[in-house]
Amino acid sequence: MKCDLEFISDADIYRQVILQEIPSVKKFLWIGTSDLKDLYIDQGKKKVPFLKLLSQLIDDNVSIRLIHAKEPGPNFRKDFDRYPNLVEGMEKLLCPRIHFKSVIVDGKFAYSGSANLTGAGMGAKSDGKRNFESGIITRDPGLVGKIMQQFDELWMGQHCPGCKRKKYCFEYREME
């Protein structure tokens, strides 16, 4: 990356965020998305579930947090079950109000944009099947910090007391 802020779109999101930055994580990975589906990525000469990469990161002692808005589809759940270390090794939060999409790597890199954590959203599908998405990537400490703050405030439940959608929120019902 040549500057501290770069506009990316479509398949560049897949190449730069999913294939380049996420595999390089050393300490922690935070992912925020409203939609969550099975995403297959290139690993060597094969396509593998993105969850396999997350499983490998957990094995390397990377802390992973995932916030998503709704239950993932059956294919995602089937892939999830193939990697038992994800159950205890990946922290998850379900918030029906989340609509931001972000990826934060070690507090030093961030993506923020329109792409959900799906094959079509992240640009992993072919030209005729992927969504038209865009976002920014940055290493600017101030901007990364603001993206992290938004994620962390939601993670810590800062918005829960005043939320008008509590009846749809499994997490909030668990806290009562």
Image (cartoon, grey):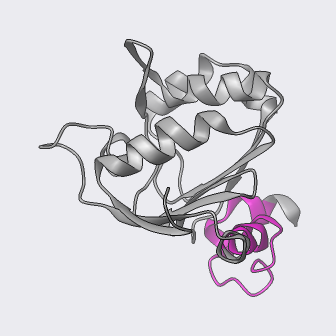
Query: Picture coordinates of residue 164 (x, y %)?
Result: 64, 84
The quadrant holding residue 174 is bottom right
Image x and y of residue 95, in percent:
64, 63
Q: Quadrant of residue 133?
A: bottom left
Residue beneath the point at 35% across and 40% down = 119
Image position of 45 with respect to 23: above or below: above
Membership of 82 in magenta stretch: no
Decide which of 45, 70 is in the foreground and name it: 45
State the quadrant of the C terminus: bottom right
Q: Nearer the viewer, residue 39 or 160?
A: 39
Across and down, in percent, residue 150 comes to 69, 74
- Please identify the residue farthest to the top as the structure is shown: 45
Question: In the displayed image of the protein, which residue is found farthest to the bottom?
Answer: 162
Give the residue furthest to the left.
Answer: 128
Tell me if 176 is positioned left or right of 106 in this view.
right
The residue located at (64%, 31%) in the rendering is: 54
Determine the image quadrant of residue 39: top left
Q: Is residue 105 left or right of residue 121?
A: right
In the image shown, does 67 or 60 lie closer to the viewer? 60
Q: Residue at x 45, y 66 (%)?
A: 6
In the rendered picture of this protein, how many numbered marks are placed on residues? 0
Q: Is residue 152 magenta?
A: yes
Q: Is residue 110 above or below residue 157?
A: above
Q: Position of residue 17 (x, y in %)?
A: 49, 47
Numbered range of the magenta stretch: 147-173
132 lies left or right of 24 = left
